[in-house]
């Protein structure tokens, strides 16, 4: 179990009929029904080409309220979820966006801050959550970027010219991004290209 998680990892792969039905189900099961009513939320499926760099997102309008200050307005929330994911990843993505809504109702922001991760911990999808028997595409983008940043930090400490393994072949480490998640490698004839740092291994 990951250190941040307060409850066992979710492995929920129950069928998803519609995003509306999924929202109702998760609002009841994970959030105690405290989030916006389903009639106050707009839902959209989006193709991967329409959501590059994200598995889902949430948009909302804000309004100053007498109690609670700046909070998301009722009837102003839109949640979009990428198509083509496994059922359990779709459920996790919806829960992630709903956690943003729950956190926004507390502190008025949509950041991946302490409030957000406290909510995620409480519903079983902590910061380091991984599915058992993880399948291709199930690792969330936050985890992918975190692993790539750690890998970049590691490769910065290695001398350029170090031999590395990438996709089963042996290459030479040529450069490392100062700000980013990639390293540059070269093959035996000097052809260079940038690859995700976490995909490169020590020889």
Image: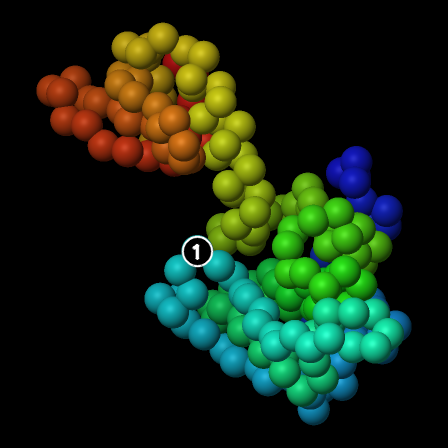
- Residue 50 seen in the figure: yes
Query: Which residue is identified by label 1?
Result: 53
In the image, residue 52 above or below residue 63: above
Q: Which residue is at a point 65% across and 74% down the rendered structure image? A: 62
In the image, residue 109 above or below residue 64: above
Closer to us: 78 or 151: 78
Q: Which residue is at a point 13% across and 20% down the rendered structure image? A: 190
What colour scheme was applied to this rendering of the protein? rainbow
Element type at marker 1? loop
- Residue 29 seen in the figure: no
4 sits left or right of 175 in the view: right
Label 1 crowd bin: few (<14), some (14–19), many (20+), radius 10 Å: few
Q: Which residue is at a point 22% across and 23% down the rendered structure image? A: 186
175 sits left or right of 84 in the view: left
Residue 97, x across and y down, in percent? 64, 66
- Work out which quarter of the rendered image holds the C terminus and state it: top left
Q: Quadrant of residue 43?
A: bottom right
């Amino acid at each position: 179990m990951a250190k941040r998680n307060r409850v066992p990892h979710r492995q929920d792969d129950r069928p998803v009929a519609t995003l509306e039905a999924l929202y109702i189900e998760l609002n009841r099961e994970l959030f105690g029904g405290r989030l916006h009513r389903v009639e106050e939320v707009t839902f959209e499926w989006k193709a991967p080409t329409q959501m590059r760099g994200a598995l889902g997102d949430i948009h909302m309008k804000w309004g100053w309220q007498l109690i609670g200050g700046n909070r998301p307005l009722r009837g102003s929330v839109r949640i979009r979820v990428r198509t083509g994911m496994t059922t359990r990843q779709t459920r996790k993505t919806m829960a992630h966006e709903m956690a943003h809504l729950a956190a926004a109702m507390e502190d008025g922001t949509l950041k991946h801050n302490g409030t957000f991760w406290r909510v995620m911990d409480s519903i079983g999808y902590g910061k380091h959550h991984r599915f058992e028997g993880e399948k291709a595409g199930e690792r969330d983008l936050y985890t992918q970027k975190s692993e790539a940043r750690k890998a970049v930090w590691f490769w910065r400490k290695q001398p350029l010219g170090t031999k590395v393994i990438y996709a089963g072949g042996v290459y030479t480490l040529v450069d490392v991004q100062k700000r980013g998640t990639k390293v540059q490698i070269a093959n035996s004839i000097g052809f260079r290209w940038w690859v995700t740092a976490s995909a490169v291994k020590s020889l």
